[in-house]
Amino acid sequence: MRLRIWAPSADRVDIVCADARHAMIRADRGHWHLDVDAGALEGGYRVSLDGAEPIPDPRSRWQPDGVHGPSHIVAADDLRESAAAGADAATAGFQAPGLADAVIYELHIGTFTPEGTYRAAIGKLEYLADLGVTHVELMPVATFPGRHGWGYDGVDLYAPLPAYGTPRDLAAFIDAAHALGLAVLLDVVYNHLGPDGNYLHRFGPYFTDRVKTPWGDALNYDGPQSDPVRAFVIDNALMWLRDYGFDGLRLDAVHAIYSFEAVHVLEELSRDVRHLAEQTHRHLVLIAESDLNDPRLVRAPAQGGYGLDAHWADDFHHSLHRFFTRETSGYYSDFNGLQDLATALREAYVYQGQYSGFRQRRHGRPPLGVGADQLVVCSQNHDQIGNRAFGERLSMLVDPAQQRAIAALTLLGPCIALLFQGEEWGAGTPFLYFTDHRDPQLAEAVAAGRRREFAAFAWGQDIPNPQDGDTFRTSKLDWSELQQSAHADLLEWYRRLIQLRRGRDPGSGPAQVEVDAAAGWLSLRHAGVLALLNFAERAQAVPIPEGPWERQLRSDGPALPGNAHGSARTVVVGAGATEVYRLATGG
């Protein structure tokens, strides 16, 4: 077993076990290595720099005693339960579906089931396969302080959080998903690390003070000695994909990844992931979270881009949320009416270089050359729910008919669709911001910051305390809700929409959207599926394209299968109702 440490300023580096201290050998450019018998590390180990108090290994694969505990070795072969151990065996025969008709299901392991573990989540995978989703996306699992949290303050990037289960449990979750035809994505955070248990600064210049992120020090991707920092992050990405068998990564807030060299770190990451995909003959993807409306994220490097596979397109969410809830605070102030929603459906970007009042500057650029299968849209996600003071889901803000309209717009549009856990049945549980910091000062600072954040909204001081255990427990899904007819009916609506989406013609071009904002109706046609939405308080005639359209769904009554429209020019749609049609075979 070879251990490697990068500590360019150290004069001595030791691996410290329970009953021994092993001096590492200096290599070039601040790297140290040591060949040691794995058995000697079974009880865990730490790293001592120049004789100082031992601390965890930055590349620790397992921290069962938390962010301050000893580090443990986890070999890739040990992750697999089968006799034919290894990452290749784990993914043999499975190929992740393409993104063109993908439906991604974002979930948080700790709140997805009552137990909050990988093993418990395995029991829900058949439900997800039956729902029709193609990709399961896990919120971050890198070890962070405490027993529960969102995961965006992780500090041991290579070690899965012990509260969710063992590394082998995580690998078993991925294997179980693959057996059901589900790809698995992992949310990773490469723009900052959390404060508690973050020892990276002791080892070397992992961070820079030349730029800042809203959440912590920015990583040093382009300054002196930045090559090992890039390697630290890229090796981490490759580990999740190669050793655990993840099919892709969601890169958190790439607009806060600062890289000003000729080759951006995202381009380097994209290149290395493509090489891994070629070597393993797997379909691997990188999806960026970004609010920049910047096509360069997904353009090929030869065209001046970073070569990522897709990126989040927030304008769809913002325009949809603004229209249905009428909220105008924050970035919602930049959006208004059905016209913006129609633009988001057609082009994903509403802001393509025009002035943004919220940002007080021009924002975005035209998405030239960007395909719908390179853009991820959603009506809600962990941020848009959890960053509200009381964690309200859209199902708590709009009526049932509007929920169905929102689902149709999200799932029948041309872009990659993302759902957030429980959305499909209108879960009655909130998703709050919760933490379990063990540092008392940090815990109080987080709670006080949360209160200040929402003071301007006149919500008083009764904001749920992120540190309160009830805040976490309240956020767990209540699966018994599926026994209630209202939730079961909405779930069936989502399931039928996903079936229609996955049965579409993939080569049908961009979405065709017609809208009459004054009358209050919108029609969305894409890939042989048509949605007619009437937002008015009265029934009204909505234009329908010529052709043999068969009605599949209606939000205000039975679908009446086989009800076809040939040369009819309009369809009367009920007040506040949504109807969905499919072009008949041969039409």
Image (cartoon, rainbow, N blue to C red):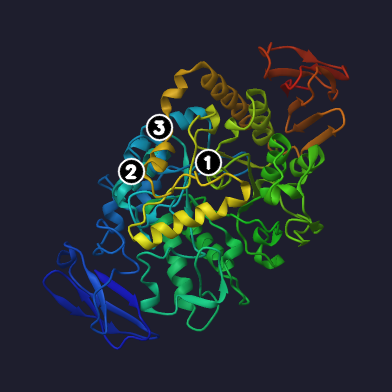
Q: Which residue is rendered at x = 80% and y = 36% of the image?
A: 512
Q: Is residue 309 left or right of residue 16?
A: right
- State which quadrant residue 439 falls in: bottom left
Residue drawn at (63%, 77%) of the image: 262
Q: Is 477 situated above or below 185?
A: above
Which image quarter: residue 323?
top right
Name the residue beneath numbered marker 1.
Answer: 391
- Give the residue pinned by disc 3: 124
Distance of mark 1 from mark 2, alpha carbons? 31 Å
Label 2 CA crowd tier, 10 Å (few <14, some 14–19, many 20+):
many
Measured in 3D between alpha carbons, the distance from the residue under mark 1 to the one under mark 3, in whole angstroms, is 23 Å
Q: Position of residue 554 (x, y in %)?
A: 69, 18
Observer-side mark, 2 or 3, equals: 3
The x and y percentages for residue 38 are 19, 65
Determine the secondary structure under disc 3.
loop
Labels 1 & 3 near each other (Cβ < 8 A): no
Q: Quadrant of residue 153?
A: bottom left
Measure the C-alpha gap from mark 2 to mark 3. Answer: 14 Å
Residue plotted at (17% across, 69% down):
37
Residue 211 visible in this rendered orientation of the protein: yes
- The answer to whether residue 285 is seen in the rendering is no
Q: Residue furthest left?
A: 19
Amino acid, disc 1: Gly
Classify mark 1: helix, strand or loop: loop
